[in-house]
Amino acid sequence: MNMRPHTTDPSSSRDALSALNVVNALGAFSHLDATDAADTAGTLAALERIADDPSQPAANRLLLQQACEALRANRDAAEAAHLRYRALFDAVPDPVSILDETGRVLDLNKAGMAAYQRPREQIVGQSIHALNPELPHDHLKPILDTLSRGETCVMEVTNMRSDGSRFPVEVHFAGFVHEGRNCIVAVARDLTGRRQAELRYRELIETIDSGVIVQQADGRVIHANVAALRIFGIGEGQHVDEELQPQHWMIVDEHGRELPPAQLPPQRAMRWGRIIESTVLGYFHRQRRQLIWLSVTSVPQYPAGADHPEQVLTLFSDVTELKRDSALFDRAQSLAHIGGWEWDTGRDRLYLTDEAQRILGRYPAPDTMEGMLDCLRDADRETLRDGFERAIATGRAIDLELQGARGSGQPFWVRVIGEAESSDPVSSRLTGTLQEVTERKQTEETLRVQARTDPLTGLLNRDAVLLELDARLQDAVQAELAVLYIDLDRFKIVNDVLGHAAGDRLLATAARRIRQAVGTEGLIARFGGDEFLVICSTGDDPGCPQRLATAILQVFGDSFRLDGEEFSITASIGIAQAPADGVRSQQLIQSADVAMYDSKRRGRNGLQAFTHQLAEQQLHRLQMETHLRRAVQNDEFRLVYQPQVALASGRLVAAESLIRWRNQSLGEMRPDRFIDHAESTGDIVGIGTWVLNESCRQLRRWRDDGLAIERIAVNVSYRQFLGQDLASNVRRALAESGLPGSSLELEFTERVLIEDEPDTLRTFAELRALGVTLSIDDFGEGYSALNYLRRLPIHGLKLSQLFVQGVPDNHSDIAVCQAITGIATSLGLGLVAEGIETEAQREFLMKLGVPIGQGYLFASGLPGDEFLERYLAGAPAPTPRPTSAGPAAHHPS
């Protein structure tokens, strides 16, 4: 059962209301009075007998005769009214029912009996559910509420015939009062025909070839038929209202002028309330770059009884093909920079619109396809010709971007779109559009160049040179080549002393010098930081790599001037050749990198070709790195401890932790052989953390065993600053071993000092706040900028064994030791000399004012238990050790 309020056709409502009025007017004389007919007849007969009785007084008899006449007149009038009521009641063409307030049927007209296919006596006296068994039990409540206010009510329900079949009806209800009782008259209008008409209308809308779109007054699309979706290219899953928004379409009139939304036919029809017929408009899709011409008719839709439309129905007919030869069509396409073409392959006749002719720039315009192909460069001619052949053979569309030149020689890019027309069995045709895309292609090329170019130097960047190198290695003609890996020596000093801006200027100048040296013989790229690559061919000139490398070294012979200062910046160059040193780009570059590092190891400012010996060293390094990565986990490291003593008394002051590594495959490895590898791979971070924790635990054990020692010194790599929270690790190691911060001394190389970053300064401050002693190891070997000593919270310096080994005989070493001692004294810094091997060295340093020292003169690195046993009982007198025992190699990083 479908019971809902419904807005009906006005004429339908008027007919139903007229029927209601007739029934209400005759209600007082309806069959409802028939129950009194017998009483009326009996009363009339009794009165007639009395009036005819001669025993009655004459006056009474006259009065009774008058009453009989009046009663007979009333009876005749009632019977006449009842006949008129029945005639009119049965004349109503729609089913009419009279109901009481409980829903019981009191009367039913002939149309009702025909509609329900039942005699009157089967319905009268029954509940309305006999006509509609699906009605809810309280269905009359909202109807009675409405009728009690003197209003009528309209509902749509589904009624049932005697055979059980259903049919939709629109029921109009009205109320009237009979003998004090509220009664209801219900007129039912069969909706079957209207529903079928609506269905046929919808089917017509969906099957016609014209597009139909229905919009609300605010422009929102509420319906679009299949043809409209096809015309506007709206696919499944796309929202029609969104796809028809102005940002997707530019709409022009027949003169090619863009129209604002207010001037479009749907808005005009809605605003003026009249039909806007057959307006030809061009719809250009901004993203697809396609133009279609449509004939547009908009019809306003008025609701019942309204004087303003609430919807507008618009019909669209595609007239693009009809506009092909129109000058106005060419004008509109020129605004969108789109030209049209058609090629009759049977007659080899080519038609071009004016805009297509302008794009090609050939006058007179080509009238054959070969003439159009002549406008393109050679490679693109074949591409377009192949596309045409496939389109004709398979019916598939073509969509190509091609490059050509106009008659003036000016280059252009054009997008060609086309498809075959199979409707003509005699002559196959191809039609499509030309769109100039020169500006977009130029923009893409600019972006491509920018994406391939290093913005600082103007050279190729890392990604671009890798792609170029891969391409050449895959080309048999170009595969014989060499890679020069160039690294600037001492560039970091300039960057740190003068700042990054000066460093950038230095890199730009270096790039110009490399370009000057290489000329047109090689491809140059900035590979990253202060590293450059040069790729050159060796097929015709095997000596080219060596010659270019020599030329590069020569142009770096002159100093660089920056901010009034001169800097001697040289280059270290590694050379690798394909295919001998690698057949893939990464392999070849890695080989050149290995050769470059070997050049640096030999003293910088030189070149080195990759050799089999270097390959073996590289393999050994890779093996070492592989084992090194698992060394901590495999418990392969151990620590030995070298005592630091007061030079004057020999008293034990502290100990320095020295790391040792023994691997089952590689054997015993000296620190100077694996520490650099650990720093380059980053494994030094984990190793350094292990050294820190183990050293603190060892000091805790010594003190628990009664050894009086002030502190233990641990070397820290610059990588531990960059790779982790060093202060947190120190705090944790001290807490786990129960040591105060003053028990720990951290020794840093000068490289940490030049990492002048906020994080570095903050870490120094946090370590000092813990009470940890901070020292610079091997002071004087590296940068030794006094500015760092002034700015950073350093406690002490370590005088490098590089200078100690030359005293007291070497005048240069004496001068350096005196200078460093003076610096430490002036700045109030502690000083420790390392590498003391002879009594003469100890005497010299003690007289110089150096308070503490360490070295083979006192002891080499000792295991923890041996160190405890020796110094718990008192250390023996210093004994000079031979200098041939090798370096102390005390640095763990």
Image (spheres, rainbow, N blue to C red):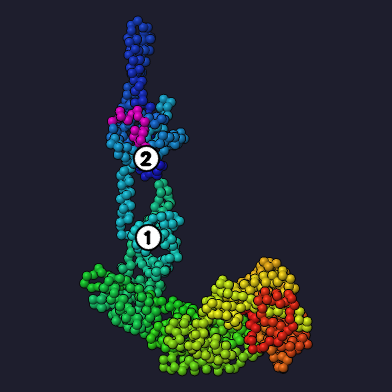
Q: Where's residue 152, x and y in %?
A: 42, 37
Judge from the rendering whether residue 673 lies leftward or rightward of residue 865; answer left or right: left
Q: Which mark is residue 1?
A: 2
Q: Where's residue 135, x and y in %?
A: 38, 36
Tell me which amino acid carries mark 1. Answer: Glu
Tell me which amino acid carries mark 2. Answer: Met
Q: Is-magenta flag for residue 131?
A: yes
Mark with earlier residue (1, 2):
2
Front residue of this view, candidates 270 and 684: 684
Q: What secondary structure is the stretch in magenta mostly built from?
A: loop
For the point 67% across and 70% down, which residue is it?
697
Magenta-tinted stretch: 119-134
Q: Which residue is mark 1?
A: 236
Front residue of this view, candidates 601 and 285: 601
Residue 874's image quarter? bottom right
- Marks counted in the figure total 2
Whether residue 495 is visible, yes or no, is yes
